[in-house]
Image (tube, rainbow, N blue to C red):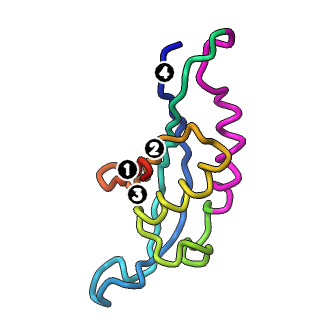
Amino acid sequence: MPKMRIYKEFKFDSAHWLPHVPPTHKCANMHGHTYIVEIHIEDELHPTLGWVLDYNDLRRIVEPLIDRLDHKVLNEIEGLENPTAEHLALWLWGAIKPSLPQLCQVVVKENPSNVCIYSGG
C-alpha cells in the first residue's frame, strides 16, 4: 500500500511572555496569539478503509491538549515556562507521539508569517 501524509489543523488562543529575552524586547511583556497548529501523520493507506487514519481519531488524541492551552497563560503550563513556538512544538510532539506513533510533523503558527516546523529527531 502507498504511504501517505494527512494533517489536521487546530486553533487556540493563548497569552504568554518570553522570560529570557531582554526586558526591552516586546515579547518580554504579556501578549497573545491565535495559534494554528497542524498535526501531520504519515502511514500506509489502509487497504479496506481507504484512509491513513480516521480524522476523528486524530481529533480525539489532540483536542484534549488543545483544551489545556486554549485561553490559558502558556507560561503557567508545566513544560512551557519559556513558551516559544519552538518549545510549544516540542511540547505537543512529546504529548502526542506516544499515542500516535505515525506522527511525523508538528507545525505551530503564531501568526501567518511566524511558523515553527518540528519533524522529530
Q: Give the CA separation, mark 2 to mark 3.
A: 16 Å
Q: Amino acid at mark 3?
A: Glu
Whole-percent x, y for residue 59 in the image: 66, 39
Are the residues flagged by discs 2 and 1 in contact, CB closer than 8 Å?
yes
Above or below: residue 26 compared with residue 56? below
Residue receiving disc 2 = 105
Of badges 4 and 2, the one in the foreground is 4
Q: Is residue 57 magenta?
A: yes
Residue at left offset 57%, top offset 17%: 45
Earlier in the chain: of badge 4 and badge 2, it is 4
Residue receiving disc 1 = 117
Whole-percent x, y for residue 111 in the image: 37, 54
Earlier in the chain: of badge 2 and badge 1, it is 2
Q: Amino acid at mark 1?
A: Ile
Instruction: Please rate how many residues cluster around mark 4, counting C-alpha atoms within 10 Å: few if below 14, some from 14 to 19, many from 20.
Output: few
Q: What is the magenta range?
A: 48-68
Q: Give the CA separation, mark 2 to mark 1.
A: 7 Å
Tell me which corner region of the image, top left, top right, bottom left or bottom right, holds residue 60: top right
Q: Which mark is residue 58?
A: none
Of badges 3 and 1, the one in the foreground is 1
Main secondary structure along the magenta-highlighted residues: helix
Whole-percent x, y for residue 10 in the image: 56, 45
Dot 1: element = strand
Tell me which corner region of the image, top left, top right, bottom left or bottom right, holds residue 68: bottom right
Earlier in the chain: of badge 3 and badge 1, it is 3
Earlier in the chain: of badge 4 and badge 1, it is 4
Of badges 3 and 4, the one in the foreground is 4
Residue receiving disc 3 = 110
Q: Amino acid at mark 4?
A: Lys
Whole-percent x, y for residue 74 in the image: 55, 71
Earlier in the chain: of badge 3 and badge 4, it is 4
